[in-house]
Image (spheres, rainbow, N blue to C red):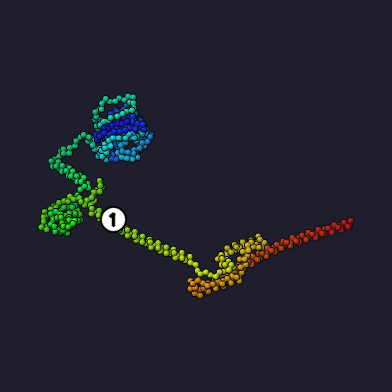
């Protein structure tokens, strides 16, 4: 179902979501049918957000539902539909304003932007604009104050219902014609939509001519902007630059700078020359550091004789060295920007050099690290010339010499326990063979054999005195370890002898007790026999 909303900017055709929002659409349609929205002011227009209306007073704090109009103020608001959810995702959606808790009156707004998620779940969407998007664009560009109120009035002039599927509520009376606006409806406005603004009223002829000249200048600037000669119509030339013309072709930049420098500091002085031939085009631009210096030079240097030529001086109107950044972004001078770019290039070059130096040093560090790793690996993998093969006894002696005394004591106690369990016999023949090989003579022979082993080429560089000292220390270590081993073996033998003696004493005691018991029995038998004979 559609409604046409006529405004001072144009017409808007709206399709309503009758199935999704039946109660809220009934309220909106009956208010349009009652001509409640005629001459209502768009009291709030926010660029890219919303354009709000529906308050007959134009203040934004009033409005009532159709039931409030028919039955009274106690029915000013009603609860609208919350489901199904319709989000404010597009431009041109019509949504009823909620005063909190989904309580709806008569105010509504059009969306002027996309994805307005802050409005979702708060206000109730009831339709969308299908015709009149150009009017929405005009609404979006309306000039407003800081409170989003338009300076020039934008009003709803009329509403037309194309189709109404709902029955009229009880007590509803449709007007026979569109009512004329009342003073209450027209209050709250500023400049009427049809009001003509006369800027020349109460002004003198000179002021009027000045206004006309400004308008002409703006029109010319707009044309130049369209053509592409100006970046922006509102751009202004710099006020510290003088235009000097009618120069002698022999006059140079240094001559002009020397002449004009008495008025103040000069930032730049440039005689414009032909790009191909380099000949002077007989005009120049002089840029001063201060605007006052430029004004002094303008008043005193006009029609002055320089190199047999009377020059003409005026304020510069050129904007060739001024570039426009964009709307609201200001302008910048080409020279300053070039200096900044050159500075950036220098910084980039410096940073690139630093980056190269860092990369070079990193490579050198990696090379050194890899070389160190290779040398360590060579030392680890280095194997000296093969020595003569040692016997089993000497190999066991070498392993035994590397073990700690605690490990040796633990092994000896374990061997003793094994012997006790096995009745004095060792479990493995290998252990017995190693134990037998640990005699002192074998150890001394092994030490002397090690001293006679031919050394590697690197060890042969060591002096003979050092080698003799090392051999002496090795023999002393071997003798000390052999003496400890002999003491350990003596202790083990003593333990074995004690265990054997205890076993013998037990067996002898058992034998003696058994023999005593046999003698006692024999004596008893003899006594019994004698007793029988005596009877």
Q: Judge by depth and name the residue closer to the eye, 78 or 248.
A: 248
Residue at left offset 30%, top offset 58%: 349
Q: Taking the image as drawn, is residue 8 in sight?
A: yes
Against 151, residue 228 (above or below) is: below
- Asked which quadrant contains residue 94, the reply is top left
Residue lying farthest to the right in this orientation? 535
Residue 224 x %, y %: 19, 46
Against 334, residue 478 (above or below) is: below
Which image quarter holds the C terminus?
bottom right
Q: Judge by depth and name the residue closer to the eye, 40 or 520.
A: 40
Against 326, residue 162 (above or below) is: above
Q: Say which residue label 1 marks.
A: 344
Q: Judge by depth and name the residue closer to the eye, 13 or 157.
A: 13
- Asked which quadrant contains residue 205, the reply is top left
Residue 318 x %, y %: 18, 50
**Left or right of 62 on screen, residue 423:** right
- Helix, strand or loop under label 1: helix
Residue at left offset 66%, top offset 66%: 494
Residue at left offset 83%, top offset 58%: 525
Residue 266 x %, y %: 19, 56
- Asked which quadrant contains residue 505, the reply is bottom right
């Amino acid at each position: 179902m559609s409604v046409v909303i006529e405004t001072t900017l144009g017409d808007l055709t709206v399709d309503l979501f009758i199935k999704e929002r039946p109660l809220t659409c009934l309220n909106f349609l009956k208010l349009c049918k009652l001509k409640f929205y005629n001459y209502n002011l768009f009291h709030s227009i926010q660029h890219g957000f919303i354009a709000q209306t529906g308050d007959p007073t134009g203040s934004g704090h009033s409005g009532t539902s159709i039931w409030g109009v028919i039955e009274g103020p106690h029915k000013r608001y009603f609860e609208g539909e919350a489901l199904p959810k319709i989000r404010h995702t597009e431009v041109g959606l019509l949504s009823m304003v909620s005063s909190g808790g989904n309580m709806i009156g008569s105010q509504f707004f059009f969306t002027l932007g996309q994805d307005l998620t802050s409005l979702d779940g708060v206000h109730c969407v009831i339709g969308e604009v299908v015709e009149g998007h150009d009017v929405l664009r005009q609404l979006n560009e309306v000039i407003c104050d800081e409170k989003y109120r338009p300076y020039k009035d934008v009003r709803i002039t009329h509403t037309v219902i194309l189709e109404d599927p709902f029955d009229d509520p009880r007590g509803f009376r449709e007007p026979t014609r569109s009512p004329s606006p009342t003073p209450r409806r027209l209050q709250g406005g500023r400049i009427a939509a049809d009001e003509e603004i006369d800027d020349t009223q109460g002004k003198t002829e000179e002021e009027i001519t000045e206004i006309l000249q400004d308008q002409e200048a703006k029109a010319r600037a707009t044309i130049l902007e369209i053509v592409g000669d100006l970046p922006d119509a509102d751009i202004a030339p710099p006020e510290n630059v003088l235009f000097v013309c009618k120069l002698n072709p022999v006059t140079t930049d240094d001559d002009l700078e020397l002449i004009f420098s008495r008025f103040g500091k000069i930032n730049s002085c440039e005689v414009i020359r032909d790009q191909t031939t380099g000949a002077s085009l007989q005009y120049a631009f002089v840029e001063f550091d201060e605007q006052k210096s430029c004004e002094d030079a303008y008043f005193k240097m006009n029609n002055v004789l320089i190199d047999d030529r009377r020059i003409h001086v005026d304020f510069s109107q050129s904007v060739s060295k001024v570039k426009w950044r964009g709307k609201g972004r200001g302008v910048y001078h080409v020279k300053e920007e070039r200096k900044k770019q050159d500075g950036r290039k220098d910084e980039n070059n410096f940073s690139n050099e630093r980056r190269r130096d860092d990369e070079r040093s990193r490579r050198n560090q990696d090379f050194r690290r890899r070389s160190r790793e290779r040398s360590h690996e060579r030392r680890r993998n280095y194997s000296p010339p093969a020595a003569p093969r040692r016997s089993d006894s000497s190999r066991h002696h070498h392993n035994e010499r590397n073990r700690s005394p605690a490990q040796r004591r633990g092994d000896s106690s374990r061997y003793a326990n094994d012997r006790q369990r096995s009745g004095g016999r060792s479990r493995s023949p290998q252990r017995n063979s190693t134990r037998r090989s640990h005699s002192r003579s074998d150890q001394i022979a092994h030490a002397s054999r090690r001293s006679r082993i031919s050394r590697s080429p690197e060890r042969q560089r060591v002096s003979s005195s050092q080698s003799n000292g090392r051999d002496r220390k090795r023999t002393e270590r071997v003798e000390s370890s052999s003496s400890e081993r002999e003491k350990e073996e003596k202790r083990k033998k003593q333990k074995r002898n004690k265990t054997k003696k205890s076993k013998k004493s037990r067996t002898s005691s058992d034998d003696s007790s058994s023999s005593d018991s046999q003698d006692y029995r024999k004596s008893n038998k003899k006594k019994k026999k004698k007793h029988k004979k005596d009877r």
